[in-house]
Image (cartoon, helix red, strand yellow):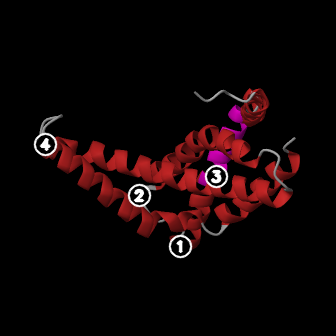
Amino acid sequence: MDQINPASAVATTGRLRAAIPSSRLLLFGAFCWGAAMAGSALSALYLRNGLLTSHVPALTMVYFLSGAFAWPLMLPLARLLAHRRPLEGRFAAFFLTLSLGTVAMTAFLFAMDYRWFYARWHAPFGTLVWAFQFVFTSASAVYQFAILGLGLFLPFGFVVLVAVSFYLARHMR
Protein backbone atom coordinates (compact mmCIF):
# COMPACT_ATOMS: atom_id res chain seq x y z
CA MET A 1 0.00 0.00 0.00
CA ASP A 2 1.32 3.44 -0.94
CA GLN A 3 1.82 6.03 1.72
CA ILE A 4 1.17 9.71 1.21
CA ASN A 5 4.32 11.79 1.25
CA PRO A 6 3.79 14.55 3.87
CA ALA A 7 5.89 17.04 1.89
CA SER A 8 3.79 16.41 -1.20
CA ALA A 9 0.57 16.86 0.77
CA VAL A 10 1.81 20.20 2.16
CA ALA A 11 2.84 21.37 -1.31
CA THR A 12 -0.56 20.42 -2.72
CA THR A 13 -2.35 22.23 0.10
CA GLY A 14 -0.21 25.33 -0.46
CA ARG A 15 -0.95 25.24 -4.18
CA LEU A 16 -4.69 24.97 -3.53
CA ARG A 17 -4.57 27.83 -1.03
CA ALA A 18 -2.71 30.00 -3.55
CA ALA A 19 -5.36 29.23 -6.15
CA ILE A 20 -8.18 30.74 -4.09
CA PRO A 21 -8.46 34.46 -4.84
CA SER A 22 -9.97 36.99 -2.46
CA SER A 23 -13.72 37.44 -2.57
CA ARG A 24 -13.16 41.06 -3.63
CA LEU A 25 -11.11 39.94 -6.63
CA LEU A 26 -13.75 37.36 -7.53
CA LEU A 27 -16.75 39.68 -7.31
CA PHE A 28 -15.23 42.92 -8.58
CA GLY A 29 -13.27 41.03 -11.24
CA ALA A 30 -16.38 39.19 -12.43
CA PHE A 31 -18.25 42.46 -12.86
CA CYS A 32 -15.32 44.13 -14.63
CA TRP A 33 -14.61 41.13 -16.87
CA GLY A 34 -18.30 40.92 -17.79
CA ALA A 35 -18.40 44.64 -18.53
CA ALA A 36 -15.26 44.35 -20.64
CA MET A 37 -16.72 41.48 -22.68
CA ALA A 38 -20.01 43.34 -23.14
CA GLY A 39 -18.04 46.43 -24.16
CA SER A 40 -16.05 44.37 -26.62
CA ALA A 41 -19.23 43.02 -28.19
CA LEU A 42 -20.79 46.49 -28.38
CA SER A 43 -17.64 47.97 -29.90
CA ALA A 44 -17.44 45.24 -32.52
CA LEU A 45 -21.13 45.63 -33.36
CA TYR A 46 -20.65 49.38 -33.68
CA LEU A 47 -17.67 48.94 -36.00
CA ARG A 48 -19.50 46.31 -38.06
CA ASN A 49 -22.82 47.98 -38.62
CA GLY A 50 -23.24 50.98 -36.33
CA LEU A 51 -25.30 48.93 -33.81
CA LEU A 52 -28.04 48.49 -36.42
CA THR A 53 -29.45 45.27 -35.05
CA SER A 54 -32.50 44.61 -32.97
CA HIS A 55 -30.58 42.21 -30.73
CA VAL A 56 -28.15 44.67 -29.12
CA PRO A 57 -29.62 44.38 -25.58
CA ALA A 58 -29.73 40.56 -25.70
CA LEU A 59 -26.22 40.28 -27.12
CA THR A 60 -24.89 42.73 -24.55
CA MET A 61 -26.47 40.70 -21.76
CA VAL A 62 -25.13 37.38 -23.09
CA TYR A 63 -21.59 38.74 -23.39
CA PHE A 64 -21.76 40.41 -19.99
CA LEU A 65 -23.04 37.26 -18.29
CA SER A 66 -20.55 35.04 -20.06
CA GLY A 67 -17.69 37.16 -18.76
CA ALA A 68 -19.19 37.49 -15.30
CA PHE A 69 -19.80 33.72 -15.01
CA ALA A 70 -16.48 32.68 -16.56
CA TRP A 71 -14.30 34.86 -14.32
CA PRO A 72 -15.01 33.15 -10.95
CA LEU A 73 -14.62 29.72 -12.55
CA MET A 74 -11.46 30.38 -14.54
CA LEU A 75 -9.53 32.63 -12.17
CA PRO A 76 -8.93 29.93 -9.52
CA LEU A 77 -7.99 27.46 -12.26
CA ALA A 78 -5.54 29.95 -13.75
CA ARG A 79 -4.05 30.65 -10.34
CA LEU A 80 -3.69 26.92 -9.72
CA LEU A 81 -1.87 26.49 -13.03
CA ALA A 82 0.25 29.61 -12.52
CA HIS A 83 1.43 28.77 -9.01
CA ARG A 84 5.23 29.11 -8.67
CA ARG A 85 5.73 29.61 -12.39
CA PRO A 86 7.83 32.33 -14.02
CA LEU A 87 6.10 35.42 -15.37
CA GLU A 88 5.69 33.90 -18.86
CA GLY A 89 4.06 30.78 -17.44
CA ARG A 90 1.69 32.79 -15.27
CA PHE A 91 0.76 34.97 -18.24
CA ALA A 92 0.07 31.88 -20.36
CA ALA A 93 -2.07 30.33 -17.62
CA PHE A 94 -4.21 33.45 -17.26
CA PHE A 95 -4.41 34.07 -20.99
CA LEU A 96 -5.47 30.52 -21.85
CA THR A 97 -7.93 29.94 -19.04
CA LEU A 98 -9.64 33.31 -19.33
CA SER A 99 -9.91 33.15 -23.12
CA LEU A 100 -11.06 29.53 -23.36
CA GLY A 101 -13.35 29.82 -20.34
CA THR A 102 -15.02 33.00 -21.58
CA VAL A 103 -15.53 31.60 -25.07
CA ALA A 104 -16.88 28.33 -23.66
CA MET A 105 -19.26 30.15 -21.31
CA THR A 106 -20.50 32.38 -24.14
CA ALA A 107 -21.07 29.35 -26.37
CA PHE A 108 -22.92 27.66 -23.50
CA LEU A 109 -25.19 30.67 -22.98
CA PHE A 110 -25.89 30.83 -26.71
CA ALA A 111 -26.78 27.12 -26.64
CA MET A 112 -29.13 27.59 -23.69
CA ASP A 113 -30.79 30.54 -25.43
CA TYR A 114 -31.37 28.39 -28.49
CA ARG A 115 -32.69 25.57 -26.32
CA TRP A 116 -35.09 27.92 -24.60
CA PHE A 117 -36.35 29.29 -27.94
CA TYR A 118 -36.79 25.88 -29.62
CA ALA A 119 -38.12 24.06 -26.54
CA ARG A 120 -41.74 24.59 -27.57
CA TRP A 121 -41.21 22.42 -30.66
CA HIS A 122 -39.17 19.71 -28.95
CA ALA A 123 -40.33 16.37 -27.61
CA PRO A 124 -41.12 15.96 -23.89
CA PHE A 125 -38.20 16.11 -21.45
CA GLY A 126 -36.27 12.92 -20.88
CA THR A 127 -37.23 11.09 -24.05
CA LEU A 128 -34.68 9.84 -26.56
CA VAL A 129 -36.01 12.24 -29.18
CA TRP A 130 -35.65 15.11 -26.71
CA ALA A 131 -32.03 14.12 -26.04
CA PHE A 132 -31.21 14.17 -29.77
CA GLN A 133 -32.99 17.50 -30.18
CA PHE A 134 -31.13 18.95 -27.20
CA VAL A 135 -27.73 17.79 -28.46
CA PHE A 136 -28.23 18.96 -32.03
CA THR A 137 -29.83 22.27 -31.06
CA SER A 138 -26.91 22.95 -28.73
CA ALA A 139 -24.38 21.90 -31.36
CA SER A 140 -25.92 24.17 -33.98
CA ALA A 141 -25.95 27.07 -31.50
CA VAL A 142 -22.27 26.54 -30.68
CA TYR A 143 -21.46 26.34 -34.40
CA GLN A 144 -23.36 29.54 -35.14
CA PHE A 145 -21.63 31.26 -32.21
CA ALA A 146 -18.24 30.11 -33.54
CA ILE A 147 -19.00 31.62 -36.95
CA LEU A 148 -20.81 34.81 -35.93
CA GLY A 149 -20.14 35.43 -32.26
CA LEU A 150 -16.41 34.94 -31.80
CA GLY A 151 -15.72 38.02 -33.89
CA LEU A 152 -17.43 40.16 -31.27
CA PHE A 153 -14.48 39.51 -28.95
CA LEU A 154 -12.15 41.13 -31.48
CA PRO A 155 -10.26 43.43 -31.50
CA PHE A 156 -11.01 45.00 -28.11
CA GLY A 157 -11.64 41.83 -26.14
CA PHE A 158 -8.26 40.50 -27.20
CA VAL A 159 -6.52 43.68 -26.07
CA VAL A 160 -8.29 43.53 -22.69
CA LEU A 161 -7.42 39.83 -22.38
CA VAL A 162 -3.71 40.52 -22.93
CA ALA A 163 -3.72 43.45 -20.48
CA VAL A 164 -5.62 41.58 -17.75
CA SER A 165 -3.51 38.45 -18.17
CA PHE A 166 -0.32 40.49 -17.86
CA TYR A 167 -1.66 42.37 -14.83
CA LEU A 168 -2.72 39.18 -13.06
CA ALA A 169 0.58 37.46 -13.89
CA ARG A 170 2.58 40.38 -12.50
CA HIS A 171 0.55 40.73 -9.31
CA MET A 172 0.14 37.08 -8.34
CA ARG A 173 2.06 36.28 -5.18
| Magenta extent | 26-37
Circle 1 Cα neighbour tier, 10 Å, few/some/many (<14 / 14–19 / ≥20)? few
- For the residues labelled 4 and 2, the Cα–Cα distance comes to 35 Å
The circle drawn on residue 128 is 4
The circle drawn on residue 48 is 1
User: Circle 1 sits in a helix, a strand or a loop, which is it?
Assistant: helix
- For the residues labelled 4 and 1, the Cα–Cα distance comes to 41 Å
Q: Are marks 1 and 3 in contact (CB under 8 Å)?
A: no
Residue 152 in view in this figure: yes
Q: Is residue 155 above or below residue 79?
A: below
Residue at image x 87%, y 46%? 171
Q: Is residue 8 above or below residue 119?
A: above
Residue at image x 85%, y 55%? 86
Q: Is residue 6 above or below residue 144?
A: above
Residue 51 in view in this figure: no
Amino acid at the residue labelled 4: Leu
The total number of labels drawn is 4
Q: Closer to the camera: disc 3 or disc 4?
A: 4
Q: Position of residue 47 (x, y in %)?
A: 59, 71
Q: Which residue is mark 3?
A: 98
Circle 3 Cα neighbour tier, 10 Å, few/some/many (<14 / 14–19 / ≥20)? many
Dot placed on the residue nearer the N-terminal end, 1 or 2 = 1
Name the quadrant of the C terminus: top right
Q: Which residue is mark 2?
A: 54
- For the residues labelled 3 and 4, the Cα–Cα distance comes to 35 Å
- For the residues labelled 1 and 2, the Cα–Cα distance comes to 14 Å
- For the residues labelled 1 and 3, the Cα–Cα distance comes to 25 Å
User: Circle 3 sits in a helix, a strand or a loop, which is it?
Assistant: helix
Amino acid at the residue labelled 1: Arg
Dot placed on the residue nearer the N-terminal end, 3 or 4 = 3
